[in-house]
Image: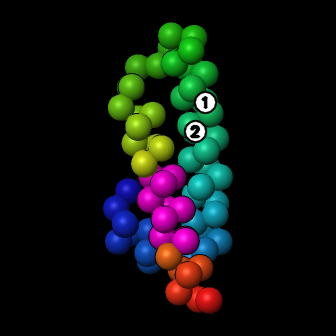
Amino acid sequence: MKSADIRHKTDDELRGEIEQLTKEAFNLRFQRASGQLENNARVRQVRRDIARIRTIMGERARKAS
């Protein structure tokens, strides 16, 4: 997910996206622990996407205040 795509979404959409990504990260952790994870790079990608979204939401909050 690119930051330009994130910037075009509303805050509600971003909150939903964070919720979805955190659930995915949770499931990926379980898969890794049980040895069923096939795509190890996806864990890193999900974490970075969450961080990207939170960064942009923080920028918006600072800009609004």
Against 46, residue 58 (above or below) is: below
Is 1 positioned to the left or the right of 64 in the image? Answer: left
From this viewpoint, is residue 62 visible?
A: yes
Against 46, residue 27 (above or below) is: above
Q: Quadrant of residue 22?
A: top right
Q: Tag 2, which secondary structure?
A: helix
- Percent position (x, y) of residue 25? 56, 37
Our reading of the magenta stretch's main secondary structure is helix
- The residue drawn where x is 64% and y is 41% is 23
**Which residue in the structure is indicated by mark 2?**
24
Tell how many labels: 2
Q: Quadrant of residue 4?
A: bottom left
- Disc 2 marks which amino acid? Glu
The magenta-colored residue range is 49-58
Q: Distance from label 1 to label 2 (Cα)?
A: 5 Å
Against 63, residue 47 (above or below) is: above
Q: Which of the image's four quarters has the C terminus?
A: bottom right
**Is residue 53 inside the magenta stretch?**
yes
Coloring scheme used:
rainbow
Q: Residue pushed farthest top?
A: 35
- Dot 1 and dot 2 residues touching (CB under 8 Å): yes
- The residue drawn where x is 48% and y is 44% is 47
Q: Tag 1, which secondary structure?
A: helix
- Disc 1 marks which amino acid? Asn
**Which residue in the structure is indicated by mark 1?**
27
- Percent position (x, y) of residue 14? 57, 66
